Amino acid sequence: MTFDKTKLYNSKPSILDAEWYLLTLDNETHRLVDYLYQKYKIPNYISPHLSFKGMNFENFDDFLFPKLKNLLPDPFVFQDLEKGVKRLAEEVLHSRPIGIFGDYDVDGATSAALIANYLEYCGCKTFIHIPDRFLEGYGPNERALKGLHEKGAELILTVDCGISSFEPLKAMSSVNLDLIVIDHHIPDTILPPAYAIINPKRIDTQKGFEDLCAAGVSFIFLIGLNRELRRKGFFRNKEEPDLFKFLDLVALGTVCDVVPLKGLNRAFVKQGLSVMKKRENLGIRALCDVSKVNNQPNTQALGFSLGPRINAGGRIGNSELGVYLLKETDEIKSLEIASKLDDLNKKRRLLTAELEKSVIGQIEKIININNNTKPNAIVVSGNDFHEGIIGIVAGKMKELYNRLVCVISINQDGICKGSGRSINGIPLGDIILEASKLKIIHSGGGHDMAAGFTVKQDKINTFRDFLIEKVDLLMNKEIPKVKHFAASVIPISSCTLELAEWLEDLGPWGTDMEEPKFIIPNSKISSLRKFGSNQEHVSFYITDRSSTKLKVKKFNILNSPLNKIFDNYENINLSFLGRLNIDTWNNSKSLEMMLDDIIYADDT
């Protein structure tokens, strides 16, 4: 199924310098729209977006009702997975302690908790180590691995890390220790020394599962382990654990690692949200309570409420708080840890706002020096940049300037830590690996859209020049504008709770399966107010010619060009682009639009 074209909606760039495209349907797509309404009563305003995302007559049922049993692979198709589970099964059968080394983000915390919860159910003691971001940095280190071994672990699993840890893993060859690496980051052509390495991005493993996060890979690993233990008779006098009860952790890791929500990932999240609704994981329950996520969690709650609080521990506090929250079995302790993470997240937001101002100042100076032109890649650095939040700020700057942005924290020892966020079409992870091979940076790795690295202070300018050269080559000197694709132009009177409920039912939405956006044309703003500790958010109503009102919200507007509208909006006709959402407050539901962009109505 194809689209004849997408029609450019706005004749001039939007307030956020983006292009809006309205989906224009061919005859076959019109038939799909009619079919979805007749069979499922799906509103016609939504269906163009479903067709745009590849839905058709044959695959729609699988999209609407994704079943894990139809999507899960045989675990042993992953290279080294069978070898790894057989080794771990021996430790479980003999009730030996297991070491787990995880990353300090949500994917690492959920992966470590997932495996630890399973092993502890099976009677094994686990020792977990999550590295301190500032003292240890990313990935396994020799001291921590030896520490887990000294506690009694003769087998250590690294989760969401390890694929680029050549020296620390090599150093373990001197002790009686086996290492199993469970990771999903881009590997080099040569793999580090380990007993088993399970990574869907290995060039010698079955294709089709490269989009899994570490929590998804860990879940498949546990399916293989469970099968092996069953074959060995381990569950003859013991009830098998219900692996599906762990899907709330898999969903949390999948959403927060921003991997594509298609196929198996979509099924993980849809099933995991159903498990999360039961509130059986005490840590997630406590985190929902302190985050005021009182209704059934959705991907937005996971990505913007739960995830940032877990990450706050690793960014500015104790990096192990997240994983211990997710495996806590005491309700009071769960609330205590969740409250600590909530407090840390509030502090993290304040630090982020301060660093944003400093970074924007640097970027504006770069633009001025560059004849008021934004370079195709932006690198900024500073002595006072907090290492724990440079990734967040890099992401915000990427959104603000539509450029690949790297933010570097300069350390006294001369080894600086950096974090980068990319735009579509620029594979940052590959660029970082190339820079590492060329000795431009000390170390690094990541994904297409995000990466972390270390670089010597005297190499920062060399790294910046290398980055700009690579991006210039990839983009042919032209950075494309941000493009928004709207499913429909819709009047406010058609924006109903029923329509928003359909959008919820058709979820989960996320990366590569974004929720539909709608254009509301020729409307006016009223009752605008800013809120938040720094007045960083805004809410208002919009009214069109029907005099019907719709509430609109936009978060994080500090330093946004949208403020020129919000500071002078009276008697101006505007068109709005955004997503419809159900706001649940005091057990009541109300409709709102989450704003993406605005254009002047005469620019359509």
Image (cartoon, rainbow, N blue to C red):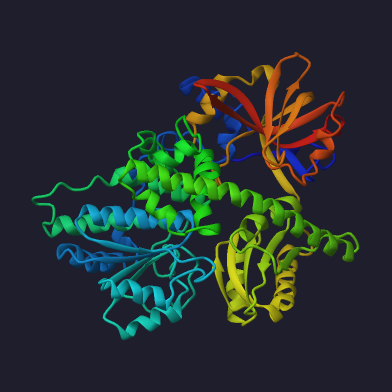
Vertical side of 342 occupied by 457: above or below: below
Horizontally, residue 87 falls left or right of residue 506, namely: left
Residue 564: x and y in percent read 84, 38
Is residue 208 in view from this perspective?
A: no
Q: Nearer the viewer, residue 170 or 487?
A: 170
Q: Nearer the viewer, residue 385 or 426?
A: 385
Q: How many marks?
A: 0
Quick one: which residue is furthest to the top in this view? Answer: 546
Horizontally, residue 27 falls left or right of residue 244, namely: right
- Where, by quadrant of the figure, is residue 234 drawn? bottom left
Quick one: which residue is furthest to the right in this view? Answer: 371
Q: Nearer the viewer, residue 272 or 522?
A: 272
Residue 63: x and y in percent read 45, 37
Q: Quadrant of the C terminus?
A: top right
Is residue 468 in view from this perspective?
A: yes
- Where, by quadrant of the figure, is residue 45 drawn? top right
* Residue found at x 58% / y 41%: 514
Q: Quadrant of the N terminus?
A: top right
Vertical side of 382 occupied by 42: above or below: above
Residue 489: x and y in percent read 70, 27
* Residue found at x 59% / y 46%: 346
Vertical side of 578 occupied by 312: above or below: below
Quick one: which residue is furthest to the left in this view? Answer: 237
Horizontally, residue 318 falls left or right of residue 601, namely: left
Q: Nearer the viewer, residue 469 or 101?
A: 101
* Residue found at x 67% / y 37%: 532
Residue 385: x and y in percent read 67, 64
* Residue found at x 52% / y 65%: 133
- Where, by quadrant of the figure, is residue 425 drawn? bottom right
